[in-house]
Image (spheres, grey):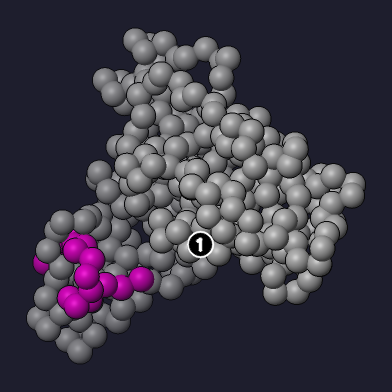
């Protein structure tokens, strides 16, 4: 098993990694330039997102002025922007009364407006159909899409200095705590026995399960919120084989449904010929005996198909981001 470096770990549970490690009080230009993609949103060209009183999300806003009357919703937004420019981030609009209340930053914890007397709270939808979300908090907001290349941050609490980082690797120098800050990377849930394994330019949130047959291991892993591990690259396979300490271990790949078509458990997609050429020896998988429908690693150094009733440990993986 690859040992964990002795550095502070940010405990991230049930929340996306980047949301937890990048609260928006960090210097926003630094954050957006390297850690996330961002777009500029305009009220006039997008659909507004609304929250009603019945919403389970406690989301409110501070009013910028007393309500205006006799305005349509589009005119309400236009006047708010015209009079308050960059301070206008929301409106409360009552469609029957044509009542418009300009609002500032939408924040969690503030009371929602009363729908019957004040109206519905609206703020911009920055295009969540393209993967962007409007992140709110700490007196600011940003329309962002989280990058898949950011795996760590160096953060200096006194200077509020945030340096986004890539994969944590052994052999690289730790940052200077006094001038740069502390290195953080995600904890994938070690309270349930999962560990974040790092190496070979990749990583995985994994747990080794005791020896059982394939179906029982798959069910146990699913009960933990995971799936039997996948490895589409030789680097990921090497990482998982090191984690299993050389033991033969069940993987999340099988052809139980259709012989010869191996399916990855995490995506439901078939094994490609390119993946097969990298992950299996040239003479495998061969369905020896006519009943080898499940897959193991470390046999001896790549993957191999075996009968599903075989008893091996299994590598359970779950997403950490």
Could you tell me if residue 33 is visible in this image? Answer: no
Relative to the observer, which residue lies in front, 69 or 204? Answer: 204
Asked which secondary structure carries label 1, the reply is helix
Label 1, on which residue? Answer: 216
Residue drawn at 61 percent across, 45 percent down: 249
Residue 65 shown in magenta: yes
Our reading of the magenta stretch's main secondary structure is loop
The correct choice, above or below, for 265 with respect to 36 in the image is below
Image position of 215 (left or right of 52): right
Residue drawn at 53 percent across, 55 percent down: 212
Could you tell me if residue 180 is visible in this image? Answer: yes
Please give the range of residues in magenta: 49-68
Relative to the observer, which residue lies in front, 209 or 61? Answer: 209
Residue 74, position in %: x, y?
35, 76
The image quarter in which residue 75 lies: bottom left
The image quarter in which residue 224 lies: bottom left
Image position of 20 (left or right of 63): right
- Crowd rating for badge 1 (residues with CA inside 10 Å; few <14, some 14–19, many 20+): few
Residue 35, position in %: x, y?
50, 38
Image position of 172 (left or right of 25): right
Residue 186, position in %: x, y?
42, 37
The correct choice, above or below, for 91 with respect to 19 in the image is below
Residue drawn at 37 percent across, 64 percent down: 124
Residue 245 shown in magenta: no
Relative to the observer, which residue lies in front, 12 or 223? Answer: 223
Residue 60, position in %: x, y?
18, 62
């Amino acid at each position: 098993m690859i040992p964990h470096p002795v550095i502070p770990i940010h405990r991230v549970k049930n929340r996306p990694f980047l949301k937890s490690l990048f609260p928006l009080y960090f210097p926003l230009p630094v954050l957006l330039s390297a850690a996330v993609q961002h777009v500029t949103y305009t009220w006039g060209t997008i659909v507004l997102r609304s929250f009603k009183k019945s919403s389970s999300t406690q989301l409110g806003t501070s009013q910028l002025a007393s309500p205006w009357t006799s305005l349509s919703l589009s005119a309400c937004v236009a006047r708010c922007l015209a009079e308050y420019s960059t301070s206008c981030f929301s409106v409360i609009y009552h469609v029957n009364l044509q009542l418009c209340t300009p609002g500032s930053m939408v924040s969690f914890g503030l009371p929602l407006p009363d729908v019957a007397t004040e109206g519905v709270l609206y703020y911009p939808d920055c295009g969540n159909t393209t993967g962007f979300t409007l992140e709110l908090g700490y007196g600011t907001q940003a329309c962002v899409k989280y990058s898949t290349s950011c795996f760590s941050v160096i953060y200096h609490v006194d200077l509020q200095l945030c340096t986004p980082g890539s994969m944590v690797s052994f052999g690289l120098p730790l940052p200077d705590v006094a001038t740069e800050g502390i290195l953080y990377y995600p904890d994938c849930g070690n309270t349930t026995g999962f560990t974040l394994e790092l190496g070979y330019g990749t990583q995985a949130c994994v747990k080794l399960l005791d020896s059982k047959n394939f179906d029982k291991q798959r069910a146990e892993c699913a009960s933990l919120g995971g799936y039997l591990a996948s490895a589409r690259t030789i680097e990921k396979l090497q990482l998982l084989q090191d984690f299993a300490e050389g033991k033969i271990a069940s993987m999340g790949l099988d052809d139980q449904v259709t012989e010869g078509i191996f399916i990855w458990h995490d995506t439901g997609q078939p094994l490609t010929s390119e993946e097969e050429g990298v992950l299996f020896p040239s003479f495998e998988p061969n369905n020896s005996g006519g009943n080898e429908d499940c897959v193991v690693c470390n046999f001896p150094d790549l993957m191999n198909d075996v009968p599903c009733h075989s008893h091996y440990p299994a590598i359970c993986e779950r997403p950490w981001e």
